[in-house]
Structure formats: structure tokens, C-alpha cells
Image: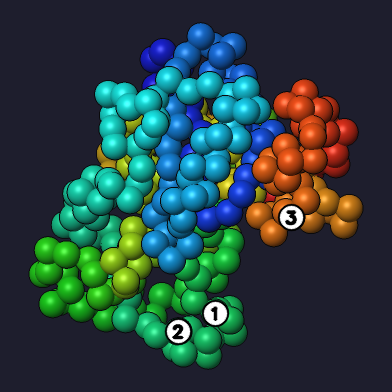
Amino acid sequence: MTNSPYRGRIAPSPTGLLHLGHARTFWNAFERARQSSGTLVLRNEDLDPERSRAEFATAFLEDLRWLGIEWQEGPDVGGPFAPYAQSERRDFYLSAWRRLRDTGAIYACICSRKDLAQIAQAPHEGVGGLQGDGNDEPLYPGTCRERGVEHALAANDPRGFNWRFRVPDGRVISFHDGKQSEQRFTAGVDFGDFVLWRRDDVPAYQLAAVVDDDAMRITEVVRGCDLLRSTARQLLLAEALGIAPPAYYHCDLVTDARGERLAKRHDALSLRSLRAAGHSPADVRKMWETESSACRKP
């Protein structure tokens, strides 16, 4: 894909207001697309029905335009690969789920939260990587790998089960990152069988990102380095789907005074708050240049 015309993307989630860290990452994506005379796609990653809010989607469109970021395709401007909101792309994800089910790459998991809470390595059941890089999804012990839930495999719809990707234990996944250099993760050690479709009928971040980046012809993914482990998962998933992966560029994260990465709870550093306080886009860009940044391998 690297020989194709450059196509980058920014993919905010409407689960809160964008903050200074988001702004710097999205600005990097914008700059890399502009420097390559390429196309920038804006994708609304509104998969999570419990946390996504229309007002936050409106806010990130306004805030990114105020910052000076321009995109050529997106939910507000259209484009050849619409729709650009993940909540409207279920058929794409369902088609990928069926392909993975038919090849045995995934299996239905019937473990309850209580089951997983009783396992030392799994203090809680993750949300399937809907937000963030999936580090909140504990290392799954493989309880349902060989259970053979036949009625689930025969079903033509994923709802009712957590569907997990069967990782090849011990396999080393390595890739070159445009910012962070060489990366190596070991399946079954750094991450286990991960959820790609939730029992409440919500496709997970890992599946949606791979399917959409391919469908929208993305050639380079620019995002935060807290998603490095996600990339290893997504490379395995792309391979199982027969998809050529894009290049990756994982930016350092803006951190707070304690060295913690910024989160949407940092309201004082949201773009909306900074605008309200009278700061200009140039002021914001100066802020992230002077703020601490780091990339600790997840």
C-alpha cells in the first residue's frame, strides 16, 4: 500500500471533548497527509452506544476545524467510501466476522464476568478494545477455545456471545513504526485471545479499525503510541482476513504533571475549554510543543 497515493485518517470518538493530546496527534496526521500531497479522511468512531454522544461528534468537528485541520472525506463532507461513521458500517464488520468464523479464526466465548473475575490474570472482563488499545482487556486464559459452541458457530449473527480471535501462541509479531522504530510483541504473552465482537452485538475496536482502514484505502495510520499493542493484534487480524496492512506512525503522548497520559477527564486541557479561555489555535500548538511527552511501550 505504500506505493499508493497517500491516504491518512483521523478517527476521533464522540465519548468526550478532545484534549491537547488528541489535538497534537491529529495535527501530526494532518501534517503528514499535507506533506505527502495526500488525502486525509475523518472517521467518526462511534461504535460504543453507551458512551457515544451526538453533541461530542458535533464538538470535535468544530474544534478540529477551529484548530486548522482540514480533511477531504468525512461524515460532514462525504466521499467515495461513505458512510464515515462506524455506527453505520455494521454490514462491513458483519461480513468480516463471517469470514473469520468460517475459517475458524474466531470462537464464541461464553465466560461470564464472574468467571473471568475468578482468574488471577483477569481481574475484570474488558470491553473488547472499544476504546484505547485493549490494554484493559486482560490476558484471556483460553477457557472457551475448545468448548465448541456449535449452535453459535452455526448462527449467522454474532450477538449473544463474546467472539474472540484465536491468537497463535508464541508467535512474534514485529513491525517497523515510522516514529517508534522496530516493535516486537509475542502473541499469548503480550496479549491473548482478544474480543472482536461483544455479546451485546457491538463490534470491537480491533475489528472495526482493520476493516475500515482497508475499505477506506488508508495507507498510513497515525495515532498515539498507547496503541502499539493494538497494532500487533490488528496485523494478525489483517492477515487472517487477507488484508494488506497500512504503514504505522505512533506519536508520543502528551502527559500531565504526574507523567500520566492525558485523558478526556482533563477538562481544563480540552480544546473547547482552551477556546473558551481565549486561546488561539497558534497558542494551542505552542502548548503541546512545551508540554511533556513520552511513549512507554505498553
Q: Position of residue 273 (x, y in %)?
A: 73, 45
Q: Position of residue 133 (x, y in %)?
A: 55, 54
Disc nearer the start of the sequence (2/1): 2
- Say which residue label 2 marks: 113
47 is higher (above) or lower (below) than 29 = below
Name the residue nearer the viewer: 29 or 95.
29
Of marks 1 and 3, the one in the foreground: 3
Cα–Cα gap, marks 3 and 2? 30 Å
Direction from residue 294 to residue 80 in the image, left or right = left
Cα–Cα gap, marks 2 and 1? 7 Å
- Say which residue label 1 marks: 124
Q: Residue at x 44, y 27 (%)?
A: 41
Q: Residues within 10 Å of mark 2 (few under 14, many from 20)?
A: few
- Say which residue label 3 marks: 266
35 is higher (above) or lower (below) than 188 = above
Q: Residue furthest top?
A: 37
Rendered image quadrant of residue 218: top left
Q: Residue at x 58, y 54 (%)?
A: 16
Name the residue nearer the viewer: 1 or 26.
26
Mark 3 residue type: His
Cα–Cα gap, marks 1 and 3? 25 Å
